[in-house]
Image (cartoon, helix red, strand yellow):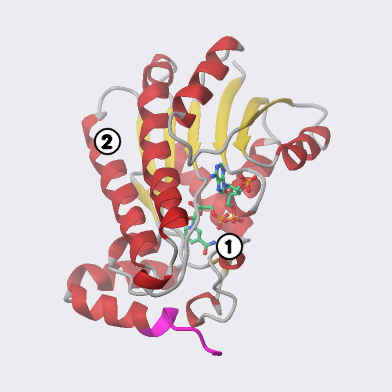
Amino acid sequence: MVKTILITGATSGIGNAFAKLFAHEPVHLILVSRNEKMMGKMKDEMPHRNVTIIKKDLSAVNAAREVYQEVKQRGLVVDRLINNAGFGLIGRFDQVPIEPMSDMIRLNCSALTELSYYFLADIRSRSGKIMNVASTAAYQPGPYMTVYFATKAFVLSFSEALSEELKGSGVTVTALCPGPTHTNFGTTAHAENVRLFSRSMDAHRVAKLGYQAMERGKRVVIPGALNQFGAVAAKFLPRILGAKAVKMAVRPTKH
Ligand SMILES: NC(=O)c1ccc[n+]([C@@H]2O[C@H](COP(=O)([O-])OP(=O)(O)OC[C@H]3O[C@@H](n4cnc5c(N)ncnc54)[C@H](OP(=O)(O)O)[C@@H]3O)[C@@H](O)[C@H]2O)c1
């Protein structure tokens, strides 16, 4: 049976790499993001695939429910939900405007939670899979990226708990925890001159490892040996040391 895969944030970076991976399979892709033109271009580049485009700002209240309703109106049943869309912001907490910070919480946490909620019954009916893109940021507090790190801790905790809750139901939940990865993330976060991003992984490699882990039903996947080491170290070291390490790594190299 042709699988129906919904990917949020497929117009760029890791999500775009996911879409390209699935393009080699007999799937129906549902792409959800704000950039309709880019999604249209992606659809044109995959003439041999069914591609449905849903233009949506997922940081808006009720956006997840509207996406679900649109998918239902089109008569589609989702097998794989890839909650990938997300962004970060760098800066001293009291100097970052509150509006984009609140948008970040709604996109990274609320939309991901609500999409999982609305689509779960359909995914269960197909013994399907959910993948939530967290981050190695989930493993320690992140000074100068305070809210972003906290959103990713939420995503990891939520995913691990839901995975355990759904054990035996036929549905698996995978948290993908990339470290720094070459995408537009750094530009959006204003992180061009930040040490943390000086050594980044390739987005296609990250997506491939995430895809393989999701298909195997793994609970958590951390791409890259260095990132795995960092996550393990964060589990054993006092959390304040992790926070201090991030503080040094996130501080801009140029002023
Ligand atoms: N790159 C890294 O270093 C890194 C590391 C760890 C985790 N991650 C996580 O990986 C995920 C993907 O990020 P990326 O690195 O691939 O960044 P990216 O290249 O900036 O891609 C972000 C994607 O999210 C979509 N998006 C952003 N705001 C949205 C909104 N309000 N509504 C709907 N879609 C929205 C964007 O699409 P539109 O602009 O078309 O809406 C875009 O397709 C994020 O969850 C991020 O936190 C990234």
Residue 142 x/y as whole percent: 33, 70
Image quarter (top left, top right, bottom left or bottom right) of the N terminus: top right
The first of marks 2 and 1 along the sequence is 2
Q: Is residue 72 visible?
A: yes
CB atoms of marks 2 and 1 within 8 Å: no
Main secondary structure along the magenta-highlighted residues: loop
Q: Look at label 2 and name its amino acid.
A: Leu
Return the x and y of residue 207 as percentages of the image width and height.
56, 51
- Residue depicted at 28% across the width and 68% down the height: 141
Label at residue 112: none
Write the residue at 63% across / 61% down: 184
Between residues 40 and 225, which one lies in front from this camera angle? 40
Stretch of the chain drawn in magenta:
248-255
**Vertical placement of 184 versus 62: above or below?**
below
At a point 63% along the width and 40% down the height, the residue shown is 34
Residue type (three-letter) at the residue carrying disc 1: Thr
Q: CA distance from mark 2 to mark 1?
A: 30 Å
Residue 217 in view here: no
Residue 249 placement, left or right of 74: left
Residue 253 included in the magenta stretch of the image: yes
The C terminus sits in image quarter: bottom right
Question: Which numbered mark, 2 or 1, is in the foreground of this view?
Answer: 1
The answer as to whether callout 1 falls within 8 Å of ligand 1 is yes
**Disc 1 element:** helix
Q: Which residue is mark 2?
A: 162
**Residue at which label 1 appears:** 188
Residue 199: x and y in percent read 55, 77
Asked if 43 appears above or below 124 in the picture, the reply is below
